[in-house]
Image: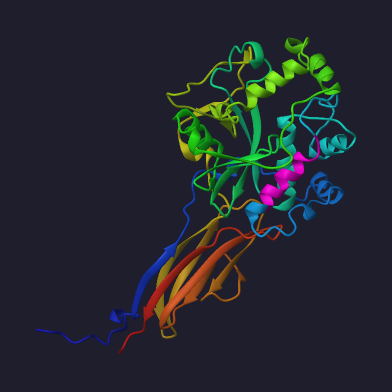
Amino acid sequence: MIRPVSDDSRFRVPGEFDAIACDVSDFVGDWTQLDYGDPFAPRIAALREEFALDDVAAGCATEFEGFLALKRWVRSRWNHGWSRSFGSVADALDILREAARGEQFNCGHYSTVFRACATALGWPARPVSVALADCSFPRDDRIGNVGHAIPEVWSNEHRKWVVMDPDLNVHYERDGVPLSAWEIREAWLSGQADCVNVVQDQPEFVAPTGATIEVLRETYPALATADEERVRLLCRRFTRHRAMDYYARLRIAGWEWLDRRCLPTFVSHFSPAPAGRWTSHMPDIYWTLNMVRLTTQPAWDEAGAKLTIRLQHCMPWFDHLEVSVDDGAWARCGEGLDWPMHAGVNSLQCRAVNALGRPGIATRIEVAYSPPRW
């Protein structure tokens, strides 16, 4: 026997909801474990103003092109070398001012400057330390040359961390996709280095010469007799495998990556290795940023059907959330909102925006809705 539909409102359905498309990026890891710096700190603000950083990426069509422009600009400020100012420079502003006077600095300083400039422009970046597999007791041309410092910057465009090396003025790609430090490491240790394209920018790295080598001899006792030929060999060792062999050991945010192909070392360059925690859990070192995730709860009343949305973000320097309904203009919203359904396809996009006005990655959902026919 077929029973008639009850008039009891408890059993009245709101029509049909059907999700037909969904692009929701899940959060990975703990994005709050790192201090990303303060874009509005006085020294960062002075850096942005004094060196006209807004002009560096002006005219770039994409965020990634902006990263490349910044990398290129940082490399152009000085050539790799050593300075008696090493002990007196406190931050990127000091380094750039000293470089403008002709001083030369090395990879760690390039990384520091790139990260501070990225912070000033609203791009989260972080320091990464890499090293050769056999870094404990180096010999010959490896002395003073077992590690490298690089920045990674979060790419909304590629939804990942990517290496920008302003010292060598390169980034790394595989199948046209820029790589993280861990991905470079994996390619090297798995014998797939030939699959990686090292994209060289201008100006290129040049081997130090002249007065900066005198500073090197004063600074590092093991290199007290180094001359230009010795330094040239150091640089040749550094670049002969496109620096990919320097990614065998990886340290990020106090974590040292661990696997059977490259076990931890307790000594680095004849000295105790830096203290760190070991991990083989990818989210510990590769967490996500600038994403929004949502939860939904259907509801209906006499006014019609709706989805109640709750939003969470993982954005440094967060300012506000925005939504776009049916591909309309972006509008500010709170952490919760009601999304009324209309007949047909309903679309909703959500994103976070940071304090410098840079939007994050948009989450999108499309729902087909058919109102009840009784």
The answer to whether residue 283 is visible is yes
Q: Is residue 213 magenta?
A: no
Quadrant in which the C terminus is drawn:
bottom left
Q: Residue at x 71, y 35 (%)?
A: 167
* In-image side of 302 versus 143 (left or right): left
Quadrant in which the N terminus is drawn:
bottom left
Q: Is residue 67 magenta?
A: yes
Q: Is residue 298 above or below residue 221?
A: below
Q: Is residue 18 above or below residue 45?
A: below
Q: Residue at x 60, y 58 (%)?
A: 360
Q: Residue at x 78, y 10 (%)?
A: 224
User: Residue at the bottom extreme?
Assistant: 374
User: Residue at the left extreme?
Assistant: 1
* In-image side of 209 versus 129 (left or right): right
Residue 229 at x, y percent in the picture: 74, 16
Residue 332 at x, y percent in the picture: 62, 69
* Image-quadrant location for residue 146: top right
Residue 203 at x, y percent in the picture: 74, 40
Q: Which region shows up in magenta?
A: 66-78
The overriding secondary structure of the stretch rendered in magenta is helix
Closer to the camera in the image, 95 or 75: 75
Closer to the camera in the image, 29 or 362: 362
Q: Residue at x 46, y 59 (%)?
A: 24
